Amino acid sequence: MTALVTNVIPNVGADIAPLLVAPANGDTAVCGSGMFLYVKNTNAAACVVTIACPVIQDGRLTTSSSTFSVPLTTGIGVIPLLPLYADPTTGRATITSYSVTSGVTVGVVRVP
């Protein structure tokens, strides 16, 4: 489990490849407007990313998690880290699991 660092991407763009790190189940990230989890998958299997969703709607309806599939081999996923993923205690999104981690790298980016 890692507290992923937020990388601010300037309006002119940037090569984010050097900013990517190996994922671990339980990673956390800042979430909110303009925040994204960038996932690069070179594994021979699709990578399903699961993010905890601790929000309660109408005081009674819960959603335990949200999943996103990143295609195999050269797949790239850009997953919005919406405010609804914020843990009420830490204020951070928790990436509860990656279905595969070999050949997968991740980074948190903020686009101004």
Image (cartoon, grey):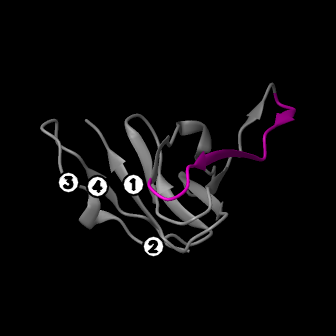
Q: CA distance from mark 3 to mark 4?
A: 11 Å
Q: Amino acid at mark 2?
A: Ala
Residue bearing the label numbered 4: 7
The answer to whether residue 1 is magenta is no
Q: Position of residue 47 (x, y in %)?
A: 60, 58
Of label 1 and label 3, which has the lower sequence position?
Answer: 3
Q: CA distance from mark 3 to mark 2?
A: 17 Å
The reply, left or right, for residue 60 in relation to residue 87 is: right
Q: Position of residue 80 (x, y in %)?
A: 49, 39
Q: CA distance from mark 2 to mark 1?
A: 12 Å
Secondary structure under the numbered disc 1 in the rendered image? strand
The reply, left or right, for residue 73 in relation to residue 89 is: left
Q: What range of the chain is rendered magenta?
A: 59-74
Of label 2 and label 4, which has the lower sequence position?
Answer: 4
Of label 3 and label 4, which has the lower sequence position?
Answer: 4
Q: Position of residue 98 (x, y in %)?
A: 63, 63
Q: Quadrant of residue 90?
A: bottom right
Point 71% across, 39% down: residue: 55
